Amino acid sequence: MQFILNQEELTVENFAPDTTLLEYLRTQLMHRGSKEGCASGDCGACTLVVADPSPNGLTYRTVNSCITYLGSLEGRQVITVEGLSSSTGELHPVQQAMVDHHASQCGFCTPGFVMSLFSLYKQREQLTQQERLTREEINEHLGGNLCRCTGYRPIIDAALSLSTQPDAFTEQTQSIREALLTLQASAQTNVPQPSLTPSSAFFHSPTQLSELIEWLEAHPDARLVAGGTDLALDTTQQLKDIPKLIYTGKVAELKRIEVTDDSLILGAAVTYQECHAQMKTHFPPLAALFVRLGSQQIRNQGTLGGNIANASPIGDTPPVLLALDAELRLVSPEGQQTLPIKDFFTGYRQTCLPKAGILESIRIPLLDPADFFRVYKISKRLDDDISAVCFALRIRLDAKGCISDARLGLGGMAATPARALHAEQALLGQAFTLEGIQAAQHALTQDFSPLTDVRASAQYRLEVAANLLTRAVHEYLTGTSLEVSHYA
């Protein structure tokens, strides 16, 4: 496979399929500026920037290189902290700002912070002296970078001081874009057949859905990988060997984003960041949840389809999709089928995916003007944390102000994401008031018997779920969000 590292085109042969980008850079190329702090995509010390061709140039995104498989970088540019300075040794403006504001203490986390700010710098390249980066933007982009020395103030000061202007990367945009397009075209002309591929180990990147299904059928023990934000933990945390990987990120059918008269349709390999704009337009509460889902690096890699197919009881998007009556399209060698997401989860981390089958797309019905929709995530930290409870509510009110339809989707309350069917039934015909929700609050104990674990006790989860119904009523009656947005 071929990719561009900084400005150099590289060809990599005979690598283990589950080799991570960070491992390859540090052990094979001796690029050791990026660090391994957690090996799970949480601390950001390993942050690098990946550039992909776009219609007008390049799109720059941060990734956690510790959980990014090397094979997924084919036909892409990887930018490391070593590649930021000019050929004469002049620091990039982001690096210089960090120096000027004394924004490095022990230095272990510094390369990751620099790369996150570089990505933001490139995304805001038209920034002027009159339109500087905002603290909110900076906080969002640095949410996945931890400084154990707690030296955040000078880091943020460095970011606030930036006024972007074209840099050396700007001058090379078109030449890099053309080189990447050439590499991608070359990769598509040398596609191995599954029957001719050694059965022991491979990393394959199909570009068509039919090719993907053919490979899965030929290699039923292969693992699918999209963003790898969960699967790669088997490599880095469990130290498991994964000899057969099939990458879904190049399959056109799995990357589509389509808006129809009544639905938003998303391919299963669409990342959170790629669909965020559509979510802001059609499902603002879900878009707000996305900002709290992992970090910028995770949202650039993680996919909606992966979050669903992983079938974790604490995944954040399935409860919301349950409340929205989403439908899933499954494809296998036997054909295609569409089913409601409520029928997809069959047990703890178990689904009804057929053999050699995949989740192809998610269809989300658009909201009716009479719908009231809210999403709440309860966790110990605001950013980059696992939910104790994820609660999604969608109700429809009739002309008299009574609830004619109700959906409550919850995560963290059972072995699977699930709807609160008894509570939904108790809401029907009621006014959406504090009195009108009391029966539904009591009914939650019929719907769920949650576990006690390190994140929350069973009793806490039940009480929080009931309290979130109360919160939704207050927000409905006052028209004001009760979300805390500023912390002391």
Image (tube, helix red, strand yellow):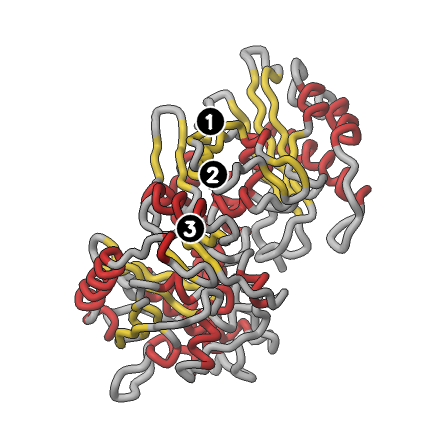
Tell which circle, 2 or 3, labels the residue nearer the N-terminal end.
3
Q: Can you say whether 182 is above or below 55 in the image?
A: below
Mark 3, Cα crowd under 10 Å, few <14 / some 14-19 / many 20+, is many
CA–CA distance in space, label 2 to label 1: 11 Å
Residue wearing tag 3: 273
CA–CA distance in space, label 2 to label 3: 14 Å
CA–CA distance in space, label 1 to label 3: 21 Å
Residue wearing tag 2: 284
Q: Nearer the viewer, mark 1 or mark 3?
A: 3
Q: Is residue 120 visible?
A: no
Please state the horizontal and vertical placement of residue 38, each as a whole percent of the image. 59, 70
Dot 3 amino acid type: Gln
Dot 1 amino acid type: Leu
Name the element at disc 2.
Answer: helix
Q: Is residue 247 visible?
A: yes
Residue visible at 55% across and 32% down in the picture: 341
Front-most of residues 400 and 302: 302
